[in-house]
Image: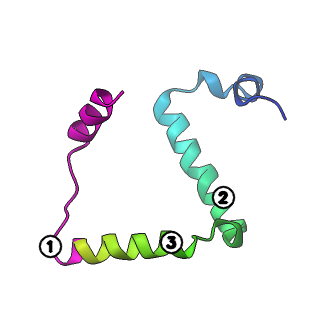
Amino acid sequence: MQPMGERMKRLGLDKLPIDERLALLDELWESVASVAPATLQLSPEEIAELDRRLDALEAGGDRGRPAAEVLAELRRSR
């Protein structure tokens, strides 16, 4: 398999603006999800975690944190 950078260059994708690459990424993901849902199944642990988070959100609990705060914490932890 070719490294992704080479494939992107061969297809000319490396020349696309970032917003177009992100849109393409979304389209690619949707195309994969639509034809291969069985391969994208969540594990029981992942389902339980998503359920826990949804319950907390619906209960008015954990509303998350601003991205800037999370990024700053990650940078400090390096």
Closer to the camera, 4 or 35? 4
Provide the secondary structure element on which disc 1 rests: loop
Marks 1 and 2, Cα distance to the nearest angstrom? Answer: 34 Å
Q: Name the residue under label 2.
A: 31
Q: Is residue 76 magenta?
A: yes
Q: Name the image quarter holding residue 77.
A: top left
Marks 3 and 2, Cα distance to the nearest angstrom? Answer: 25 Å
Residue at 77% x, 24% y is: 10
| Marks 1 and 3 in Cβ contact (< 8 Å) | no
Closer to the camera, 7 or 50? 50
Three-letter residue code for mark 2? Ser
Q: Which range of residues does the magenta coloring cover?
A: 57-78
Residue 12: image location, x then y, percent: 70, 25
Give the color scheme: rainbow, by chain, secondary structure or one colour.
rainbow
Q: Mark 1 points at which residue?
A: 60
Residue at 70% x, 73% y is: 38
The quarter of the image holding the C terminus is top left
